[in-house]
Image: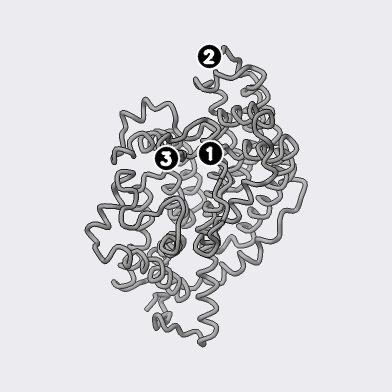
């Protein structure tokens, strides 16, 4: 049944979010690249856009349910802003940033890229049997091949855990860009850096998973942005904002055609679901919890915190994540296997409500504001470090995409980059600055050799 709804409450909520964004950007449009702005724009893109457009699914709910959903969005926004502006922010990020900043010199950057390339590509080459032609075919087939010989299932074992080392390559791709742009490198180093830069982009587009595209391109483009002057940076941000609409068209085309193995622009124009429609999921949640489904009391967050632990080490690791449970509640189950044939992202605000109701929406948003304030402080303290800036951008992309659902995998690039930095700097320190992987010196011209 389709209802006639008024979106006035969503218009008012959009005005609140817009004012909060503009009050900050009037100082400098470059503040678009901040955790605060990314979160607020995420609230609009993931929730309010769907509410304003009154999509067919949204119109199946009552006006009361609709207005309550908008209230949840406003409550989350207010909680986030209070946590951001009334606290000094989380200080736990500062020592992490200090460690990342310690690899600014080209010698250590090259060691990082080389180390990540060797360790990250080794499982891929091993499990592909060095069949590079088939490997390339399988990773660009979208969901018709879904990774092929290096594909990973929903529930992985030892093989899947080793293939996760590929994240090292994704993590150091921006550092490879820094080496190519900032320092003189020989042909061998250029080849390694180009491979490291291109691999995550190829994997992202070839896999048809849209958020991987942003994780691959965002920090790399951020390094290019960092090297621009202030005026050029402002122009770049304006161009980026203008490209948001085409980006949604691309997301729709990828989502509509990936099962057939091709990006379909025609199908994308007619698809009813782009992937940002988290408001309709919020309405489903608030009309289901706690009447038909009890509060989760943090279980979905517990499942995500367990995610990095390999299943071969913990066979009984929790596997009922919130996306699967959402699909079960909606009846999206394969009758032959009894398993869900997709996952349904609840939206970050919906997930807060699933776990703790309205108090959770406010208090967890408050906590989020405190954490994001600390993250934004990092880039101010290390404003001269392009390496920290690239690490910071990984965080911004993660902040945006957890608007769909809290996921530990959103932070994998940051985790793997930190681990790589820790291991390489520890190794360098224990070997008198000499690496067994590569004998490197920095020439007087600043090149790596």
- Residue farthest top in this picture: 4
Q: What element carries label 2?
A: loop
Residue 24 appears in which quarter of the rendering? top right
Horizontally, residue 258 falls left or right of residue 312, namely left
| Residue at the farthest left position | 133
Residue 72: image x %, image y %? 68, 31
The furthest residue to the right: 86
SS class, disc 1 = loop
Question: What is the x, y in percent for residue 150?
Answer: 34, 57
Q: Counting residues from the N terminus, which is met first, the one under dot 3 or under dot 2?
A: 2
For label 3, the residue is 337
Q: Nearer the viewer, residue 348 or 330?
A: 330
Distance in Å between CA atoms under marks 1 and 2: 23 Å
Mark 3 vs mark 2, foreground winner is 3
* Residue receiving disc 2: 2
* Label 1, residues with CA under 10 Å away: few <14, some 14-19, many ≥20: many
Structural distance between the alpha carbons of marks 3 and 2: 32 Å
């Amino acid at each position: 049944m389709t209802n006639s709804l008024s979106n006035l409450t969503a218009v008012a909520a959009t005005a609140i979010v817009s004012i909060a964004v503009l009050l900050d950007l009037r100082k400098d449009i470059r503040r678009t690249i901040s955790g605060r702005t990314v979160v607020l724009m995420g609230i609009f893109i993931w929730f309010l856009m769907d509410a304003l457009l009154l999509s067919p699914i949204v119109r199946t709910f009552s006006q009361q349910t609709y207005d309550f959903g908008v209230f949840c969005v406003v409550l989350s926004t207010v909680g986030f802003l209070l946590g951001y502006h009334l606290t000094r922010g989380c200080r736990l990020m500062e020592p992490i940033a200090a460690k990342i900043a310690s690899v600014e010199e080209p010698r250590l950057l090259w060691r990082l890229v080389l180390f990540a390339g060797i360790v990250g590509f080794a499982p891929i080459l091993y499990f592909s049997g060095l069949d590079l032609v088939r490997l390339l075919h399988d990773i660009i087939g979208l969901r018709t091949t879904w990774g092929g010989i290096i594909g990973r299932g929903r529930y992985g074992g030892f093989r899947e855990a080793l293939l996760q080392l590929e994240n090292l390559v994704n993590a150091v791709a921006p550092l490879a860009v820094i080496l190519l742009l900032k320092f003189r490198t020989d042909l061998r180093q250029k080849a390694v850096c180009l491979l490291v830069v291109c691999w995550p982009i190829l994997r992202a587009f070839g896999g048809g998973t849209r958020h991987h595209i942003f994780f691959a391109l965002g920090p790399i483009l951020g390094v290019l942005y960092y090297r621009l002057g202030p005026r050029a940076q402002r122009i770049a941000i304006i161009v980026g904002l203008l490209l948001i609409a085409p980006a949604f068209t691309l997301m729709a085309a990828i989502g509509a055609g990936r099962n057939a193995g091709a990006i379909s622009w025609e199908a994308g124009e007619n698809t009813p679901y782009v992937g940002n429609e988290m408001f309709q999921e919020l309405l489903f949640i608030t009309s289901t919890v706690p009447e038909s489904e009890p509060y989760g009391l943090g279980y979905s967050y517990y499942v995500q915190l367990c995610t990095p632990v390999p299943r071969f080490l913990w066979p009984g690791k929790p596997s009922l994540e919130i996306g699967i449970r959402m699909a079960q509640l909606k009846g999206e189950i394969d009758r032959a296997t009894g398993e869900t044939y997709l996952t349904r992202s609840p939206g970050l605000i919906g997930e807060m409500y699933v776990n703790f109701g309205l108090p959770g929406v406010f208090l967890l948003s408050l906590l989020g504001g405190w954490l994001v304030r600390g993250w934004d402080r990092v880039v101010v303290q290390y404003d001269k470090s392009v390496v920290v800036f690239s690490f910071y951008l990984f965080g911004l992309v993660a902040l945006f995409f957890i608007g769909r659902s809290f996921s530990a995998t959103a932070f994998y690039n940051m985790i793997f980059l930190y681990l790589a930095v820790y291991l390489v700097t520890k190794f360098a320190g224990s070997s008198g600055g000499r690496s067994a992987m590569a004998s490197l010196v920095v020439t007087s011209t600043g090149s790596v050799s």
